[in-house]
Amino acid sequence: MSILVLAEHHDGQLAGATAHVVAAAKAIGGDIDVLVAGENVGAVAEAAAKLDGVSKVRVADHAVYAHQLAEPMGALLVELAGDYRHVLAAASTTGKNVLPRVAALKDVSQLSEIVEVVDADTFKRPIYAGNAIATVQSADSLKVITVRSTGFDAVGEGNSAAIESVDTVVENRQSAFVKQELAQSDRPELAAAKVVISGGRGMGSGENFKLLDGIADKLGAAIGASRAAVDAGFVPNDMQVGQTGKIVAPELYIAVGISGAIQHLAGMKDSKVIVAINKDEEAPIFQVADYGLVGDLFEILPELESKL
Amino acid sequence: MKVLVAVKRVIDYNVKIRVKADHSDVDLTNVKMAMNPFCEIAVEEAVRLKERGVATEVVAVTIGPKAAQEQLRTALALGADRAIHVETEERVESLAAAKLLAKVVEEEQPGLVILGKQAIDTDNNQTGQMLAALAGLPQGTFASEVVVEGDKLQVTREIDGGLQTVSLSLPAIVTTDLRLNEPRYAKLPDIMKAKKKPLDVKSPADLGVEVTSKLTLLKVESPAERKGGIKVGSVDELVDKLKNEAKVI
Ligand SMILES: Cc1cc2nc3c(=O)[nH]c(=O)nc-3n(C[C@H](O)[C@H](O)[C@H](O)COP(=O)(O)OP(=O)(O)OC[C@H]3O[C@@H](n4cnc5c(N)ncnc54)[C@H](O)[C@@H]3O)c2cc1C
Ligand SMILES: Nc1ncnc2c1ncn2[C@@H]1O[C@H](COP(=O)(O)O)[C@@H](O)[C@H]1O
């Protein structure tokens, strides 16, 4: 029984999520191959070969896989899937974009965003914005699965797996990359940060998000946001935490001016410690907060920064 | 250009769900149901394309029980021209939904199909991508902007790091993200008019698709509850608790 893990990578670097997906693969059990597909991804392959538990890294390095567009990536995985019983990817926007195409073309269901492996056929996954956890068993001969990173601790990096190239080159006449606008930040990645401080509609403006900067600097935190803050244009979409944004589970999550709608909670309620700062003492966020502070964020944030 | 929109009947997004006592599933008896919010965005986008003269006809389709016709009537009230109901009382997994939709696409030959990116009940985020694969069409998922330019479609996608724009050949499949548009509300006269718009009913058998799935739902549980915390009285107390009690800073 072997497992194929699709590596997640950006800007020529292996993304942290891959080590969590490999951990899920280890929980399933069997030989684990990692597929690195993209253009000029030699360094990514080398990083993937270091991940504990990986037997082999397979590298498809070709212009057609640049930007990891769904159509060629799906076609490549369909070509390779025959050798495997499980195909896994991170539940990232890349994994979510590509894997259902593979499942459909192999005529199998997909299990989305698993958080636990019960056995090689049985998995747990959140449904209804995480308000219920389903245990699902698949009788399909091939399991196509996306993995929620927060459900699995990353594997270590003491390995040196073999690297081999994959010559399969597929055609793509249907889609083309036009451009990308990626948010630049020196802060840790939201999904990987040990501390996250998020602002909501209560922040009032994008300008006011600067009040979070000093605190984030002191705590080495990533900055997130509620949907309302993103919709209002305060901050870009990649900062959204929640059911339909990023799922985070840091050691410490600080929610500022966020009411605590179920869709927001879905993205952060597995954090170890939750702090809520809100002027409305009835705000639902306080029901999940370990430490709640009722008051005006415009007074509290500067004081907090100075006292850290 | 004909635009096909897939809409799903789901629990209203404001409702707090309950797990059944026997853990067989979520309890949906007497629960308020509605159109999946991402599908509302899909319908809105299709209607705007028609208002801009890009689309000539908007066809709404749903797969589900008899009651799902309510959501089709909502789509008609919002501006869809006609509707197709693939009626089944069975649980329809994304793969089966995609197969049924692929058959509808084959029959209807739309220039564009718009779906939600995710149904908020199963949180699957699969059907649009599966439909694209089965129909052999390109996909623009998690769209926050859609522009038709001749025989091409430019789709701006919300991705983890920011925004990505792709160009797709038409026909194509699009799935909607939250910021694609802000859906309108149906007006009373339009709700009345919607009752007279055509609504076709088919069965999965009519489309030659089996709805069975190889997935078994073994159990549904409530997630671990967080135990309620405390309110602190001051910033000093908060910092002290984080340092000395929780030990996270
Ligand atoms: C399909 C769907 C998907 C969704 N997905 C997501 C998602 O992924 N993530 C997400 O976050 N939301 C999501 N939402 C939206 C969600 O339902 C809420 O609307 C949203 O989370 C509210 O954001 P908020 O808490 O910032 O705003 P509000 O609910 O408006 O809350 C603002 C809070 O700020 C407080 N406040 C105001 N001023 C101050 C002040 N000066 N000092 C202190 N406190 C102050 C107020 O008391 C209030 O509690 C989704 C909704 C739908 C329908
Ligand atoms: N039973 C259904 N009927 C119509 N459309 C559906 C159905 N199931 C899924 N869809 C479409 O696919 C989208 C994504 O659903 P899912 O992949 O199940 O999360 C939804 O927003 C709908 O547009």
Image: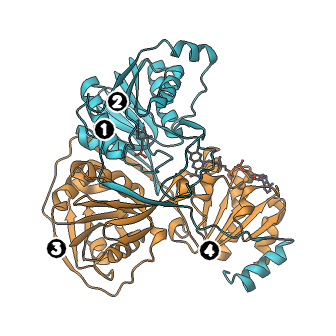
Residue B81 appears left or right of B29? left
Does any portion of residue B55 appear in the rendered image? no
SS for callout 1 = strand
Tag 1 near tag 4, CB within 8 Å: no
Instruction: Kindly indicate the quadrant of the structure image that contains residue B3.
Output: top left
Between B125 and B53, the one nearer to me in the picture = B125
Which part of the image, by quadrant, shows the C terminus of chain B?
bottom right
SS for callout 4 = loop
In the image, what residue type sits under mark 2? Leu
Between B95 and B141, the one nearer to me in the picture = B95
Distance between mark 3 and mark 4 Cα atoms: 40 Å
In the rendering, at what x and y percent does residue A277 appear? 76, 63
Distance between mark 1 and mark 4 Cα atoms: 43 Å
Q: Colour of chain B?
A: cyan
What residue would you read off at disc 1? B168
What residue would you read off at disc 2? B112
What residue would you read off at disc 4? A272
**Label 2, residues with CA under 10 Å away: few <14, some 14-19, many ≥20:** many
Tag 3 near tag 2, CB within 8 Å: no
Q: On what subunit does the disc labeled 2 rest?
A: B
**Label 1, residues with CA under 10 Å away: few <14, some 14-19, many ≥20:** many
Residue A182 appears left or right of A31? right
What residue would you read off at disc 3? A164
Dot 3 or dot 4: first in sequence order is: 3
In the rendering, at what x and y percent does residue A58 appear? 20, 70
- Report the number of discs: 4
Mark toward the viewer: 1 or 2: 2
Same chain for mark 3 and mark 2? The answer is no
Mark toward the viewer: 3 or 4: 4
Q: Residue at x 80, y 66 (%)?
A: A293
Which part of the image, by quadrant, shows the N terminus of chain B?
top left
Identify by letter the chain in orange: A
